[in-house]
Image (spheres, helix red, strand yellow):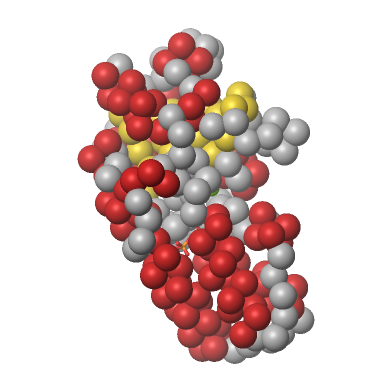
């Protein structure tokens, strides 16, 4: 049996609901470029890096851009996104998050963040959760995106724990796959029919407790 020592959390869709802000900013960009961008398409961008998201959106819109133009478009989208997250309030933390983080701290678990977002640090700071995290690994320090396990393996390494002693909390299919590829346990946040690779699926962190976490030890 491997004892669980560490919890690694994805950010967007697990701790805070920022998908709506990503959606608004991408939609504005797509509309400026002359095509639409739907919520269904936005779903497919969960866990996907900014640069790759833009490539997909341009593909869906049938628009080609040079690398330089793509860099400018990604920056423009991010400025709109940052303007929106700058107005985020602590009440935009998803239900149950802080209670669960407190329970983990009290139980002696290590806590890490594993997100594709380059805005992770700013968001954690903004909503007042930064102090719970012993390590933050985000889009600024990884070279490969989920489903590659790099983001979670780096987290385990920084925290000095074996991947098998880690549980990852993820809302994206790519993130669940990344955790599994890293040899970790995964709790999916969302629908069991969608997050089929997860060891357990709950609707949100408000459905988690230490007992359910320990039940994942095997
Ligand atoms: C998360 C979100 C994605 C987003 C990515 C990069 O994984 O689920 O939708 O594209 O982070 O975010 P960033 O804040 O760096 O643009
Ligand atoms: Mg996510």
Please indicate whether residue 143 sits to the left or right of residue 70 in the image: left
Q: Position of residue 6 (x, y in %)?
A: 37, 27
- Residue 5's spot in the image, x, y percent? 36, 22
- Considering every residue shown, the one lying at the far left of the view is 131
Instruction: Judge from the rendering whether residue 35 lies leftward or rightward of residue 147; answer left or right.
Output: right
Quarter of the image where one finds residue 4: top left
Depth check, front residue: 60 or 163: 60
Tell me where residue 53 appears, x and y as whole percent: 60, 67
Q: Nearer the viewer, residue 116 or 95?
A: 95
> In the rendered view, would you say 207 is above or below 67?
above
Is 94 placed above or below 3 here? Answer: below
Q: Residue at x 49, y 41 (%)?
A: 14
Can I make out residue 180 in this image? Answer: no
- Residue shown at 54% from the left, 39% from the top: 170
Count of labels in the image: 0
Q: Give the residue displayed 39% in from the left and 70% down from the top.
A: 83
Q: Is residue 153 above or below residue 96?
A: below
Q: Residue at x 30, y 26 (%)?
A: 102
- Relative to 166, is 190 on the left or the right? right
| Viewer-nearest residue: 151 or 210 | 210
């Amino acid at each position: 049996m491997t004892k669980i020592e560490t919890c690694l959390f994805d950010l967007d869709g697990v701790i805070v609901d920022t998908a709506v802000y990503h959606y608004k900013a991408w939609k504005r960009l797509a509309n400026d470029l002359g095509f639409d961008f739907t919520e269904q398409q936005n779903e497919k961008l969960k866990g996907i890096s900014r640069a790759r998201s833009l490539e997909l959106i341009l593909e869906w819109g049938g628009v080609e851009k040079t690398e330089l133009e793509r860099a400018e478009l990604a920056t423009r989208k991010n400025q709109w996104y940052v303007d929106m997250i700058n107005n985020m309030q602590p009440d935009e933390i998803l239900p149950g998050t802080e209670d669960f983080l407190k329970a983990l701290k009290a139980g002696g678990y290590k806590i890490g963040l594993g997100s594709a977002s380059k805005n992770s640090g700013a968001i954690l700071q903004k909503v007042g959760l930064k102090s719970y995290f012993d390590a933050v690994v985000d889009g600024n320090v990884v070279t490969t995106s989920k489903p590659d396990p790099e983001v979670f393996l780096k987290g385990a390494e920084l925290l000095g724990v074996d991947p098998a002693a880690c549980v990852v909390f993820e809302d994206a299919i790519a993130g669940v796959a990344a955790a599994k590829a890293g040899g970790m346990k995964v709790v999916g946040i969302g629908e069991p029919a969608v997050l089929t690779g997860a060891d357990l699926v709950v609707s949100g962190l408000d459905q988690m407790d230490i007992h359910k976490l320990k039940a994942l030890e095997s």
